[in-house]
Image (tube, helix red, strand yellow):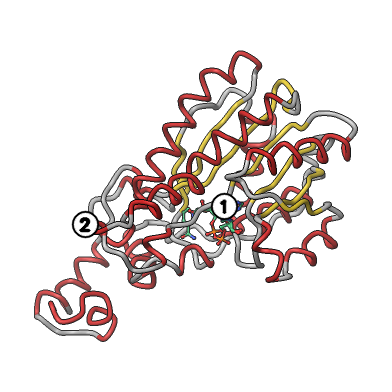
Amino acid sequence: MAATPLSGHGLLQGKTGIIFGALNPQSLAWYIAEAVHREGGRFVLTNAPVAQRLGEVDALSEKTGAPLIWADATSTDDLDRLFAEATAHFGGGIDFIVHSIGMGMNVRKNRPYEDLNPDWFLKTLDISAASLHRTITQGLKAGALNDGGSIVTLSFIGAQRTFSKYSEMGDAKALLESIVRSYGYRLAKRGIRINSVSQSPTRTSAGSGIRGFDLLYTFAETMAPLGNADSDSCADYVVSLLSDYTRMVTMQNLFHDGGFSTMGVTDELLELLGEGLLKGQDSSALQELFGDKK
Ligand SMILES: NC(=O)c1ccc[n+]([C@@H]2O[C@H](COP(=O)([O-])OP(=O)(O)OC[C@H]3O[C@@H](n4cnc5c(N)ncnc54)[C@H](O)[C@@H]3O)[C@@H](O)[C@H]2O)c1
């Protein structure tokens, strides 16, 4: 079900932050940046230097008046420079961080879970999970994080349940959510909150890297009583977590998935199974996913 776009309510007026991960207009971070802008928040946009050549983030920077600072979130030096430039820009510390970063190296290159390239696997964990730890650590060392701030990262239910084609990313998300809990305890001493938003499958560059993504999307859409949560509603939810309205919420993994995570099965899905799979009717999508085995 499509969300009705909201008009701004100044929920983030006076707040400053850093938004990681807007690559193109499909990116969740792109939607989040637009929603934060609408709510009066000021921010710096950042992404890996390799994203520069895609040349799309400039348009978002122009639209939202946010400076663009290139930084690889796996590089301590880059993060130090990012925090130094961001605090210089705002003339002080920041109130929020949106970490919307993910990359499954083996998933991208179709290496099965039973045969992961170990170096790529470590890189996947570094980019998709440890980068959150490194970002917070360098932010604290730089004295760049204001008391009472809020940090949000994006996760997927593959952290708790096995989704066959999600492969190494399930492990990365499990680590990411663990970092949310471990750092959450420590950040709370300064009133800084941290949560992960476990988002429905969403059509983005990262999403489309998952083999069989369209079927996974349709499965989740069929299972979720409200349907898959779209990017606009995800951005609005993140805004609420950056705002003072959720000031006592921390160390949580919050499902933003139209109810998917609590369902067992829906009538709609049973009907589809009855009509198709159980009668052995093949579809080209299934063939693409399972090859000769079906
Ligand atoms: N699309 C989905 O179905 C879905 C569902 C749940 C959660 N998520 C999560 O949402 C987040 C955002 O993904 P998205 O779907 O918007 O896709 P996306 O591809 O638009 O965003 C991923 C971002 O990570 C950035 N990135 C990769 N390596 C980096 C590095 N070394 N340093 C800094 N940035 C780096 C990319 O440049 C890109 O901007 C990811 O954590 C993803 O796992 C996505």
The mark nearer the N terminus, 2 or 1, is 2
Whole-angstrom CA distance, mark 2 to mark 1, is 33 Å
> Label 1: few (<14), some or many (≥20) within 10 Å?
many
Identity of the residue drawn at 80% across and 42% down: 10
Answer left or right for 196 relative to 25. left
Say whether residue 188 is left or right of residue 110: right
Q: Is any atom of residue 260 visible in this view? A: no
**Between 95 and 48, the one nearer to me in the picture:** 48
Amino acid, disc 2: Glu
Mark 2 secondary-structure assignment: helix
Residue, x 69% and y 49% (percent of image)? 71
What residue would you read off at disc 1? 234
Q: Residue 62 bears which disc, if any?
A: none
**Vertical arrangement, residue 185 with respect to residue 155, above or below:** above
Give the quadrant of residue 51.
bottom right
Which amino acid does the dot numbered 1 rest on?
Cys
Q: Which mark is residue 114?
A: 2
**In front: label 2 or label 1:** 2
Residue 102 seen from this side: yes
List x then y, in percent, for residue 33. Answer: 71, 53
**Percent from the top left, x then y, of residue 285?**
29, 81
Q: What element does badge 1 sit on?
A: helix
Task: Residue 170 in the image: state x and y as whole percent.
Answer: 34, 49
**101 in relation to 57, above or below:** above
Picture coordinates of residue 139, whole percent (x, y): 69, 30
Crowd rating for badge 2 (residues with CA inside 10 Å; few <14, some 14–19, many 20+):
few
| Residues tagged 2 and 1 counted as in contact (Cβ below 8 A) | no
